[in-house]
């Protein structure tokens, strides 16, 4: 094992007393509004999983943007939509509670989709929050389905033309105050390894399942053994019913095999070593109604 040398460590540690424009910024919007894709594109790292299935993000994910004059900590949040279901209500709460810490809220509006009652619900919530809100129209490379106003204080972005990112950063910085940094300036996220692995597996599960099945799944990483050249892990895909478990194991060219293969390839890229992934499917009946488990998964 490499011997630790205090002087080397100090020489390589950021000066956290350095003052920059620093604070938290929450990103909110309806499902599929491009919240997670945006933070990944901005940071140039896959921090938050993205799929074409609405309602992908379930937990608040931190994406830390650093440049010479600022450290902006974006909260990528889950979708907001009205629902009476316990799990969805808790997810809405994850998004809404992020307002409390944020200096400014970026409200992402998908310009390629027609106006829908979800937007009204978000507006009702925003009216109750005493924080500046910046509207950001996303997916502007696609045919717009809503009227995008021509005001100076709105922003338009697309993952294809990243030019607009600069305008957005200038706008965000105008709300931030100078202060000591919260994180070393080479940090881009704050996530534990169990969460990161479970999210990669969940992304693959979302991509290969349909209808209600992706939303009925949660991932539990049981054990990780991190060696120098190989990382071993045991993880479970939990479904809500036996019939869903059957679909994951037997449907098509075995879904579990595809999920396992794609997750393993991506994890090997992330950790830059061989990954041994033991992936099993289990049933946890009605887990979306289980208060304690919901808290454990979402917080
Ligand atoms: N055409 C186009 N598609 C985009 C753009 N940005 C994102 N997408 C697609 O939109 C889909 C949703 O992106 P996400 O970033 O997962 O959306 P989200 O807002 O995080 O969604 P939830 O986590 O479900 O709330 C993905 O399939 C992306 O490929 C864009 O600028 N242009
Ligand atoms: Mg998301």
Image (spheres, rainbow, N blue to C red):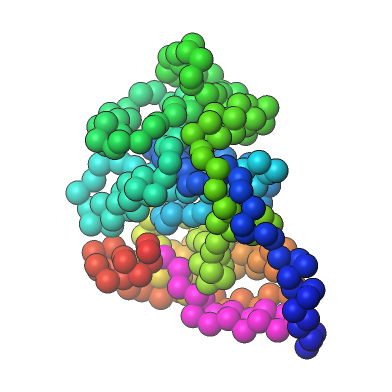
Which residue corresponds to the image point at 44% horizontal and 27% vertical from the top-left? 135
Q: Residue furthest left?
A: 84
Question: Does residue 156 show up magenta in the picture?
Answer: no
271 vs 39, left or right, is right
Q: Is residue 215 visible?
A: yes
Q: Position of residue 225 (x, y in %)?
A: 62, 84
In which quarter of the view is residue 12 placed? bottom right
Which residue corresponds to the image point at 19% horizontal and 49% vertical from the top-left? 84
Read off the magenta span: 218-235
82 vs 223, left or right, is left
Between 264 and 88, the one nearer to me in the picture: 88
153 vs 261, left or right, is left
Q: How many marks?
A: 0
112 vs 44, left or right, is left
Placement of 258 over or under 65, stated as above or below: below
Q: Is residue 253 visible?
A: no
In which quarter of the view is residue 239 placed? bottom left
Q: Quadrant of the N terminus?
A: bottom right
Which residue corresponds to the image point at 43% horizontal and 48% vertical from the top-left? 77
Q: Residue furthest top?
A: 150
**SS majority, magenta:** strand
Q: Quadrant of the C terminus?
A: bottom left
Placement of 113 over or under 242, stated as above or below: above
Placement of 194 over or under 144, stated as above or below: below
Which residue corresponds to the image point at 68% horizontal and 44% vertical from the top-left? 67
Between 24 and 138, the one nearer to me in the picture: 24
Q: Position of residue 96 (x, y in %)?
A: 32, 46
Placement of 7 over or under 244, stated as above or below: below
Q: Position of residue 130 (x, y in %)?
A: 30, 36
Question: Does residue 225 show up magenta in the picture?
Answer: yes
Q: Position of residue 248 (x, y in %)?
A: 47, 65
In which quarter of the view is residue 120 placed? top left
């Amino acid at each position: 094992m490499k011997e630790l040398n205090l002087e080397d460590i100090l020489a390589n540690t950021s000066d956290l007393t350095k003052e920059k424009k620093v604070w938290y910024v929450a990103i909110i919007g309806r499902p599929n509004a491009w919240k997670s894709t945006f933070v990944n594109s901005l940071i140039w790292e896959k921090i938050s999983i993205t799929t074409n299935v609405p309602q992908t993000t379930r937990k608040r994910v931190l994406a830390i943007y650093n440049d010479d004059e600022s450290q902006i900590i974006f909260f990528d949040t889950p979708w907001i939509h009205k629902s009476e279901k316990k799990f969805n209500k808790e997810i809405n709460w994850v998004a809404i509670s992020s307002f409390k810490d944020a200096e400014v809220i970026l409200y992402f509006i998908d310009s390629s989709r027609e106006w829908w009652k979800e937007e009204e619900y978000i507006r009702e919530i925003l009216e109750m929050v005493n924080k500046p809100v910046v509207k950001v129209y996303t997916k502007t490379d696609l045919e717009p389905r809503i009227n995008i106003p021509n005001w100076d204080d709105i922003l338009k972005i697309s993952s294809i033309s990243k030019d607009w990112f600069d305008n957005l950063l200038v706008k965000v910085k105008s709300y931030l105050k100078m202060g000591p940094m919260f994180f070393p300036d080479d940090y881009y996220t704050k996530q534990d390894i169990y969460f990161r692995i479970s999210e990669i597996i969940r992304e693959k599960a979302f991509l290969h399942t349909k209808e209600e099945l992706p939303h009925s799944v949660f991932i539990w990483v049981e054990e990780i053994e991190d060696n120098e050249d190989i990382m071993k892990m045991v993880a479970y895909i939990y479904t809500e019913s036996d019939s869903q478990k059957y679909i994951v194991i037997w449907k098509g060219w075995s879904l579990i095999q595809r999920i396992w293969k794609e997750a393993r390839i991506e994890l090997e890229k992330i950790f830059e070593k061989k990954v041994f992934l033991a992936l099993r499917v289990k049933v946890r009946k009605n887990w979306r109604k289980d208060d304690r488990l919901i808290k454990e998964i979402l917080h």
